[in-house]
Image: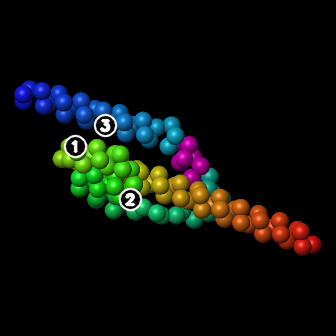
Amino acid sequence: MSRFIFPLIAGLVIAVIFQAGAAFGAGNRDLVNKYHETLEKGCPPVVVKHTVVAGVLGFLPGGGMYFTENYGAAIRDTLLWPLSVLWDPFLAVRSARAQNMQATIRACQISESRKSGREGEREKGR
């Protein structure tokens, strides 16, 4: 029985590592590029999830993933808890950063659409 536990645990760790790499692959590069473009426009960064809090909560069973609202990953990490301490803090920080980037991009888009709407109203009033 014990000789099956190590390969099972190793397989789970490898699966989680590959899943994490897929989750933060090419799509994340596009997000980062768009985030930097948004900052270059002069939009301030928005913080909706604190990365330090996410990382610290990652040491609790599924805590980092629950905090960043990744409920499927949170359940997995809760079930795999003491092993999930190896990856959950890092994934929680990355998830919090991604949510902050998305919120910054959204806020800038809303701000720009409001500005263009006001400019359009001014032109109609002329």
Q: Residue at x 24, y 48 (%)?
A: 78
Q: Which amino acid does label 3 sit on?
A: Val
Name the residue beneath numbered marker 3: 16
Name the residue beneath numbered marker 1: 80
Whether residue 96 is visible to the viewer of this picture, yes or no, is: yes
In percent of width and height, residue 51 lies at 38, 59
Q: Does residue 42 show up magenta in the picture?
A: no
Q: Which residue is drawn at 46% across and 63% down?
A: 48
- What whole-number distance in Å separates the C-alpha atoms at marks 1 and 3? 10 Å
Local SS, label 1: loop
Local SS, label 3: helix
- What whole-number distance in Å separates the C-alpha atoms at marks 2 and 1? 22 Å
Whether residue 90 is visible to the viewer of this picture, yes or no, is: no
Q: Which callout, 1 or 3, points at the residue further toward the start of the chain?
A: 3
Task: Indicate left or right for 117 with 97 as reference.
Answer: right
Q: Which residue is drawn at 56% across and 43% down?
A: 30
Task: Indicate left or right for 5 with 104 as reference.
Answer: left
Query: Chief secondary structure of the magenta span?
Result: helix
| First to last magenta residue range | 29-36
Name the residue beneath numbered marker 2: 51
* Extreme residue in the left direction: 1
Quarter of the image with the N terminus is: top left
The number of callouts visible is 3
Q: Hey, which quadrant is residue 19 in on the image?
A: top left
Q: Hey, which quadrant is residue 68 in on the image?
A: bottom left
In percent of width and height, residue 14 lies at 28, 32
* Extreme residue in the bottom direction: 125
Q: Which callout, 2 or 3, points at the residue further toward the start of the chain?
A: 3
Q: Which residue is drawn at 66% across and 65% down?
A: 111
In percent of width and height, residue 28 lies at 50, 43
User: Which mark lies nearer to you, 2 or 1?
Assistant: 1
